[in-house]
Amino acid sequence: MLGSQALETAIGLALVLFVLSSLASAIVEGIARLLRKRAKDLEDTIGQMLSGSTTFDKDAENALERFRDTTIYQSATIAASRGRRLFRTHAGPAYLSAKAFASAIDELTDNATEAPVKGLNARLAMLKAERQGLSVEKKAAIENWYDETMGRLSGAYKRWATGVLLIVGLVLAVAGNVSIFHLAQILWQQPSIRQAALNAAEQAAAKSTSPDDLIDESVKAVQDVAGIGIPVGWQSGTDWDSPAWATAHVAGWLATALLVMLGTPFWFDALSRLVSLRTTGTKPPSATQDSAAATSVQASAGASGAPAAVIASAVATALGAVAEHGGRYGTASSAPALDAGPSAAPDDSSGNHPAGSG
């Protein structure tokens, strides 16, 4: 009973954290799109790569402008601008493949062989000889260079998103009065709320095949969580005059924000695993680990040298069955006729079968 209660409480907490992290992730994604975070970081990084600058200075800006003039980047910009004309007419791409980058460099260096452009990395101007196309080896080197740089850029974006997610999670925790400690106490003490949260968690795990399935319905999910009786919101009142209440709630908000920072994929996986653990029960032990199973008994008998006794008993049983068979049919003359096969006994000189054959 205690284990089931603890598991159901953990499922309820995972449900709330999954809903909050989904809402927080949607907000962070909206902020990133509003700030054009990915596209701006991509452009700044490409400018620094092409200029060899450590910061986005004039040389980097000049190199980026040259890169923007390539047909490869212009095509990516046109594709990225579809559906955004109401908000921004010059929205650059948020992503660019390594192959496209290498092709753009190939086009960019066509004009850089004769007169290197100020701000363009001198190494790029020497990639070509007599306006010939880049070799496969040079393109591969450029693609590897780009992939390594984008890997570091992706790590920087994740750190930025994690920091923003912490801030958004804290705002949601305070706005919704979601203290993970108070929530755990209520779920532990009230079976009806715990059961309602359990039912909602099972439905959420059954409907979703990926963490992104519920992000678009995050606001509705928060309303559903409040509707099943989970104690979120400020309807329960406050007691700021009590140091214990204030300390517990502030600590609970911070803990909630830190847990939300783990992200939607983490809590979706945790919720699915916990629900699956409860619905399937404890995995039964294998036959070799179950002491009551025949496999374990046989293994134990084999370890003690009993196989010889077992074989002797089996032989005795077989001999007893043969004796009973012979007694039931009587003499050989009254036994059923047997087909003479290759193993049949040969006839004697008188033409009669040997006595007792069969």
Image (cartoon, rainbow, N blue to C red):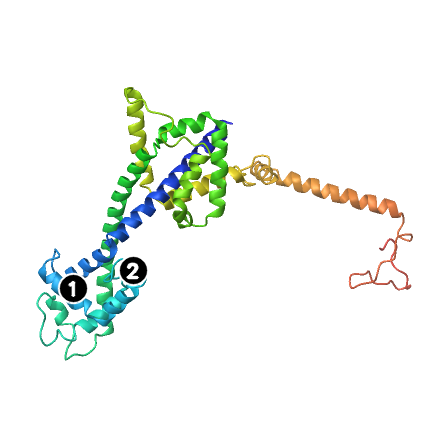
Please state the total of marks drawn on the protein image: 2
Residue at 30%, 50% in the rendered image: 30
Q: Quick one: SS at disc 1? A: helix
Q: Is residue 73 above or below residue 229?
A: below
**Which residue reaches farthest front?**
86
Q: Is residue 295 left or right of residue 323?
A: left
Comes first in the chain, label 1 or label 2: 1
Residue at 41%, 35% in the rendered image: 13
Q: Is residue 256 above or below residue 31?
A: above
Q: Quadrant of residue 58?
A: bottom left
Q: To which residue does mark 1 refer?
A: 64
Q: For the residue carrying disc 2, how many other residues have a C-alpha within 10 Å: few (<14), some (14-19), or many (20+)?
A: few
Q: Is residue 21 above or below residue 37?
A: above
Type of amino acid under label 1: Leu
Residue at 13%, 61% in the rendered image: 61
Residue 84 image label = 2
Residue at 39%, 30% in the rendered image: 183
Quarter of the image where the C terminus is located:
bottom right
Front residue of 112 and 20: 20
Percent position of residue 290, x then y: 56, 36
Percent position of residue 208, x then y: 46, 48
